Amino acid sequence: MSEIPDHPVYSKNVLEMLTVANDYCLFMAKVEGYSKSYLMSYLQKICPLLYIKGALLPVIEVRNPEANERFVAEEEWESLFNELRNKFSKDDEFWYIDNSKQEDNEPVKGSLAEHFTDLYQDLKDFILLYQKNSLDAKENAVSEIKQLFETHWGYKLVNAHKTLHYLVMRDINKQNQNSFPEFL
C-alpha cells in the first residue's frame, strides 16, 4: 500500500474538499436531467458541506505561482449558467446584502444560476489543477481555492443557500397543504 506524502496538499481536509467538489461538479455536469425540486434539494444539502470543507482548507505557501491555471472555458460557464437559469426560472433572482463590500449595505440583485455556476467554475478549476502530476500545481490549486473561498465563493454560497432554504421550505409547505384533507 502506498503512503500519502507528508505535505499539506495531501491532508485529510484537502482530500475531503476534493471529494465534495468533485461530487458537486459531476452533479452539475448532468443538471439538464434533473428536476428543479431535485436540483434544489441537492444544493440545499451540499452547500453547507462545501462551506465547511472550504473553511477547513490549510494555508499553503505556493513555491511556484506560475504553475497556476484556469480550465473552465467561457462556453462551458455559459452553458451551465443558461441551464440553471432555465431550471430556476422565476426563482432565479434574489436580493441580498453583499457583506464583502463593507462600504455599501444596499441590497443587490443576485442570480442563483450565476452563483452556482461561479462556484462550479472555481471548484472545477481546483479539481483539474490538483489532478496535475506536480506538487507545484497541487499547491496552487489548494491555495487558490482557499483564497477564492475567502473572497468569492464562500460569500456566494452563503447568500444562495439562504434563498435555497426559503424556496425548498416554501415548496415543502405547499406540498403539505395540498396533501392533507381539510377538516370541517
Image (cartoon, grey):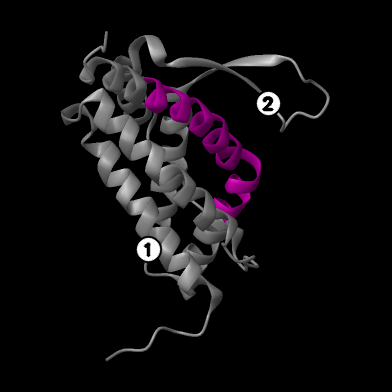
> In this rendering, is residue 140 above or below 164?
below
Tell me where residue 16 sits by quadrant: bottom left
Which quadrant of the rendered structure holds the N terminus?
Answer: bottom left
Residue closest to the far bottom: 1
Q: Residues within 10 Å of mark 2 (few under 14, many from 20)?
A: some
Tag 2, which secondary structure? loop
Assess whether residue 150 is covered by the magenta stretch.
yes
Q: Mark 2 = which residue?
A: 98
Q: Is residue 146 visible?
A: yes
Give the magenta-colored segment's residue range. Answer: 144-170
Assess whether residue 56 is covered by the magenta stretch.
no
> In this rendering, is residue 15 above or below 1?
above
**Residue 133 horizontal/vertical position (percent):** 37, 69
Q: Mark 1 = which residue?
A: 132
Tell me where residue 89 sits by quadrant: top left
Q: Is residue 72 visible?
A: no
- The residue sitting at 26% across, 42% down in the picture is 27
Q: Residues within 10 Å of mark 1 (few under 14, many from 20)?
A: few
Chief secondary structure of the magenta portion: helix
